[in-house]
Amino acid sequence: NYFSVAFKQLGETIKAARGFNEFLKFMLAYLVYNEGVIIALDFAAILGAVLFGLEQTGLIIFFILVQATNVLGALLFGNLQDRFGGKPSLSISIMLMVACIAALYFAQNQTHFFIIGGFVGIAMAGVQSVSRAMVATFSPPGKSAEFFGFFALTGRTSSFIGPAVFGYLAAELTLWYQSQGQDIVLAEQSGHRLAILSIA
């Protein structure tokens, strides 16, 4: 059946990938940095509401802004990759993402949040588009579909790790701040703000 065929094909792809050490190193790196992107996507609305008091309309505008700058980021990093190659372009996009997270930690109002969101959209598009292009670079002739499948599977199977870590840290830090005498609202804000650093 389709299920057994899929697992058989996956096994063959994994065997084939063993002969490509650089691709496997890239997949290991992807497991780590992709978690940061997933956390940012999953918790953007919560961070906007908890830290900056954004309501539904503000959050919708925020996500439209991120999507708009996402298009800009894909174009920008596509050009960067053509000029400088995949690895430098990917490094720049990840460093931009880390800089955005650092800025978010210090952000104090909704305006800061929206500006940072614009840059996050650019960085996120760079990370995602350049990563896909890197897989195409690593794929041997006739194996690109399998390598892209392995790439997608790697992202899906690990996608719960980052949000679980962030959620655990935010909850535990909130409880710790409460135990230090902060009221629940301030403790929740403090806990989430400190947990933001786990994205970086």
Image (spheres, grey):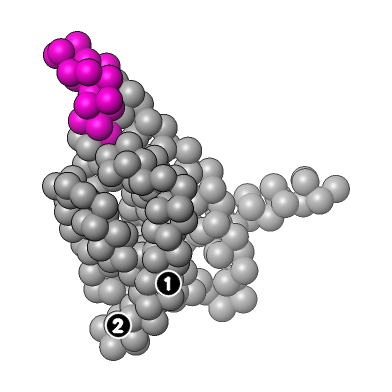
Q: Tell me where residue 192 appears, x and y as whole percent.
A: 27, 34
Helix or strand or loop: what does disc 2 sit on? helix
Q: Residues within 10 Å of mark 2 (few under 14, many from 20)?
A: some
Residue 10 horizontal side relative to residue 183, left or right: right
Circles 1 and 2: CB atoms closer than 8 Å:
no
Residue at the disc numbered 1: 68
**Is residue 178 rendered magenta in the image?**
yes
Q: Is residue 83 left or right of residue 62?
A: left
Residue type highlighted by circle 1? Ala
Q: Amino acid at mark 2?
A: Leu
Tell me the tag on residue 51. Answer: none
Location of residue 124 by image quarter: bottom left
Q: Residue at x 57, y 72 (%)?
A: 144
* x and y, in percent, of residue 135 in the image: 46, 69
Residue holding disc 2: 80
* Mark nearer the viewer, 1 or 2: 1
Magenta-span inclusion, residue 59: no
Q: Position of residue 183 (x, y in %)?
A: 22, 18
The region drawn magenta spans 175-192
Q: Which one is nearer the viewer's eye here, 117 or 23?
A: 117
Q: Horizontal and vertical percent for residue 18?
A: 47, 56
Pick whichever, 27 or 73, lies toward us. 73
Left or right side of 166 for 102: left
171 relative to 137, above or below: above
Q: Quadrant of residue 172?
A: top left
User: How many residues crowd mark 1 within 10 Å: few (<14), some (14–19), many (20+)?
Assistant: some
- Figure quadrant of residue 165: top left
